[in-house]
């Protein structure tokens, strides 16, 4: 009786079946899963959200743009499609490195807190506190390394606007050339312009971000236990949790980001420098000291200029980060368990 045969390439000693990763490769992947998953998630989310980040930077610094759509149209008209992705390469890789490091510090710090102080992963207060404290430490450490890269990114995003402010012809500059120019003209102090604001934003923002996400993840797991299983797919739950955590933390630190961007934009435009406090007062009160100050709500709204596009970007990118991160982590853990079972005792 004829038996079904697997298709073959016809070459002796060959097997057309797809080769599975070796046990050593899976183990290596498992040991470095935080870095691998965070880097992959960051590359995708940064590329997707960068056009919105470019629009946000312009809305924060240029009062000529009144709406998100109007700003987007102006960018496309004056700079073309490339204008939305101007300066993408440094943040694409620097944010991936920063996020991988940030997740590693956060994971290690959180595990240490739970082990050292006996915090329970099932206690809501313990989970929120450990996530926030681990996030604070991660944001503080990372901000010092990431500040110069973000300044170069802002220079690339605003270079058309900066040229207009200086009254000089616009000349497109590469990312590396932009960094070299800041270093040549301003030195170390120039590269770290706005560092205290960057440090404050990232320390507070990252702590709130991880604390919120861990809290929502615990709430979702408790609900799944009560319902006898997850109500929605884990990847969707991770996307929603990441979106809400990103939106909540970003809303609270957004005024700091607005002040930081304006301080940096004035330095890059060779305008007289203002301190962070002077910039805050200028934005909230108004530019003319001879005029009465703006009404309180109007002043506050100036500190949230560009929030709409930033909120959309934050929800999209952070949702993608956690969805990809959690999905890849689960895949790696399942592959590792299968590998261990296949190896036997």
Image (cartoon, rainbow, N blue to C red):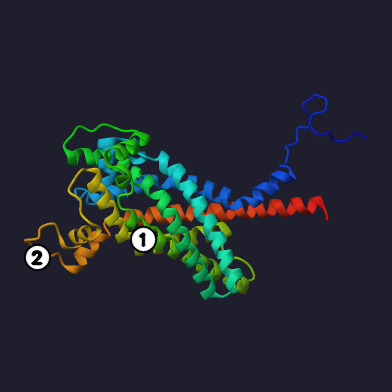
**Horizontal placement of 60 versus 102: left or right?**
left
Question: Residue 166 placed where, x, y %?
Answer: 18, 39
Camera-side mark, 2 or 1: 1
Q: Is residue 197 above or below residue 228?
A: above
Q: CA distance from mark 2 to mark 1?
A: 30 Å
Q: Residue at x 34, y 34 (%)?
A: 177
Residue beneath label 1, please? 200
Question: Residue 185 placed where, x, y %?
Answer: 27, 38
Q: Residue furthest front?
A: 188
Q: Using the rendered view, name the quadrant where residue 285 is placed.
A: bottom left
Question: Residue 111 placed where, x, y %?
Answer: 59, 64
Residue beneath label 2, please? 292
- Pick the residue in front: 46 or 91: 91
Q: Residue at x 33, y 60 (%)?
A: 254
The answer to whether residue 70 of the structure is visible from this angle is no
**Horizontal placement of 10 versus 142: left or right?**
right
The answer to whether residue 190 of the structure is visible from this angle is yes
Tag on residue 137?
A: none
């Amino acid at each position: 009786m004829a038996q079904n045969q697997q298709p073959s390439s016809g070459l002796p000693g060959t097997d057309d079946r797809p080769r599975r990763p070796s046990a050593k490769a899976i183990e290596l992947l498992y040991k470095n899963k935080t870095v691998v998953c965070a880097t992959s998630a960051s590359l995708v989310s940064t590329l997707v959200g960068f056009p919105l980040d470019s629009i946000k930077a312009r809305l924060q610094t240029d009062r000529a743009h009144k709406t998100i759509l109007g700003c987007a149209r102006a960018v496309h008209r004056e700079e073309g499609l490339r204008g939305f992705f101007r300066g993408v390469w440094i943040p694409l890789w620097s944010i991936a490195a920063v996020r991988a490091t940030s997740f590693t510090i956060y994971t290690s710090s959180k595990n240490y807190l739970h082990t050292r102080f006996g915090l329970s992963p099932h206690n809501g207060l313990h989970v929120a506190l450990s996530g926030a404290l681990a996030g604070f430490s991660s944001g503080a450490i990372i901000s010092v390394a990431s500040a110069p890269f973000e300044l170069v990114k802002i220079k690339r995003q605003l270079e058309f606007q900066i040229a207009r402010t200086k009254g000089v012809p616009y000349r497109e500059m590469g990312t590396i050339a932009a960094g070299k120019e800041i270093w040549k003209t301003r030195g170390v102090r120039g590269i770290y312009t706005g560092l205290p604001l960057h440090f404050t934003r990232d320390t507070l923002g990252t702590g709130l971000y991880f604390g919120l996400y861990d809290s929502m993840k615990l709430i979702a797991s408790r609900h799944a236990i009560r319902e006898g299983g997850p109500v929605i797919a884990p990847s969707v739950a991770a996307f929603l949790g990441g979106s809400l955590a990103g939106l909540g933390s970003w809303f609270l630190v957004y005024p700091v980001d607005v002040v930081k961007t304006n301080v940096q934009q004035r330095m890059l435009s060779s305008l007289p420098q203002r301190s962070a406090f002077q910039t805050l007062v200028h934005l909230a009160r108004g530019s003319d000291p001879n005029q009465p100050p703006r009404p309180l709500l109007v002043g506050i709204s100036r500190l949230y200029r560009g929030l709409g596009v930033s909120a959309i970007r934050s929800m999209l990118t952070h949702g993608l980060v956690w969805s990809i991160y959690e999905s890849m982590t689960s895949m790696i853990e399942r592959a590792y368990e299968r590998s261990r079972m296949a190896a036997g005792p």
